Image (cartoon, rainbow, N blue to C red):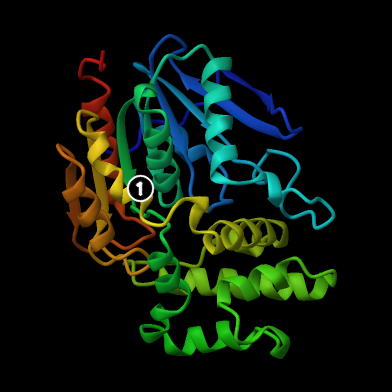
Amino acid sequence: MSLFPRIEPHDAGTLTTDDGQSVHWESCGRPDGRPVLYLHGGPGSGAGTGARRYADPRRCRIVLFDQRGCGRSRPSAADPAVDLLRTNTTAHLLSDIEQLRTLLGIRSWTVLGVSWGSTLALAYADAHRDRVDALVLAAVVTTSQREVRWITEDMGRLFPREWERFAAAVPPSLRGARLVDAYAAMLADPDAGVRERAAREWCRWEDAHVSLAPGHRPDPRYDDPRFRLEVARLVTHYWRHAAFLPDGRLLAGAARLAGVPGVLVHGLQDVSSPPDIAWRLHRAWPGSELHLLDGTGHGGTQDMTDTVVDGLQRLTTRPRRS
């Protein structure tokens, strides 16, 4: 099943959090329909207009929001003068989701999480199981220390030339630190030139390791200096802290999701988050459904899109959990 036709929001607004953040949200589709929450990747990518099109707007109330520090939410992580990262953790994001659910008068919802959004969706289900009717996770990651080490260090074995450039951008004063820590320091440097170079090299590395996807093209969003800095600061912030969760928590807690319908969609050619991540989660989550797609990398393909749309369609037409 392909994406549904383009639609515009029927409602939008700003959630003002207790600590002064302004979180942009929008609601599309049928106002009284089956609630579906979309959680974007990154961290820091923002919720694009394409995210409105995974669920059937004739039946579903589709809610999107830009996570703290990115997209249309404010303040932006691209602003180095704003000390916002100390109030930007997984716990803060989970609180934002719950405040948004309450604001919109939603009892529970089906949650779709893509890439980093799958980590956030799992963390939300772990903390608020009674608010989750079902989960659809694509390009699955749990943001464990093992995964962060793979994507920033070990994957250099697959992309030696690109990784050498990535590592060489770190100044001598920071060498010896983990690359994710070194880049976080560079992205917080008072020198705008240091921040810009770090953001550019970080995003160049991100583009390199999704390049095994068939027909891969560099992400045009990385042409925008503000977007580069926003994403690089937020990704390094969450990765260096392993999503601010006890290591392995999401996998260990998957057994508690028994009874929550789940569809996992993952590419067999995904080297950014190797397929064993989705496999291990599926094995630990009783009743979950796993689709491993050949010819698909982390950037996704039409096959991944179709499988996600089909999964959402099936889960949002079945009776809701009592």
In terms of image quadrants, where is residue 137?
top left
- Name the quadrant of the C terminus: top left
Binning the other alpha carbons within 10 Å of mark 1 as few (below 14), some (14 to 19) or many (20 upward) gives many
Q: Which residue ends up furthest to the top in the rendered image?
A: 32
Q: Is residue 244 above or below residue 255?
A: below
Q: Is residue 307 in view?
A: no
Q: Is residue 196 above or below residue 53?
A: below
Give the SS element for disc 1. Answer: helix
- Using residue 258 as the reference point, say whether residue 234 is left or right of it: right
- Using residue 135 as the reference point, say whether residue 6 is left or right of it: right
Q: Is residue 293 above or below residue 20?
A: below
Amino acid on which the number 1 mark rests in the picture: Leu
Q: Is residue 225 above or below residue 252?
A: below
- Please state the total of marks drawn on the protein image: 1
- Please name the residue shown 57% across and 26% down the image: 26
Taking depth in this image into account, of 8 and 258 the one nearest to the observer is 258
Q: Can you give x and y, in whole percent of width and height, for residue 283 in the image?
A: 16, 50
- Name the quadrant of the N terminus: top left
- Please name the residue shown 47% across and 12% down the image: 31
According to the picture, the residue beneath numbered tag 1 turns out to be: 250
- Using residue 192 as the reference point, say whether residue 23 is left or right of it: left
- Please name the residue shown 20% across and 28% down the image: 259
Q: Can you give x and y, in whole percent of width and height, for residue 59 in the image?
A: 34, 16
- Please name the residue shown 72% across and 73% down the image: 186
Q: Can you give x and y, in whole percent of width and height, for residue 184 in the image?
A: 66, 68
Q: Can you give x and y, in whole percent of width and height, for residue 230 in the image?
A: 67, 56
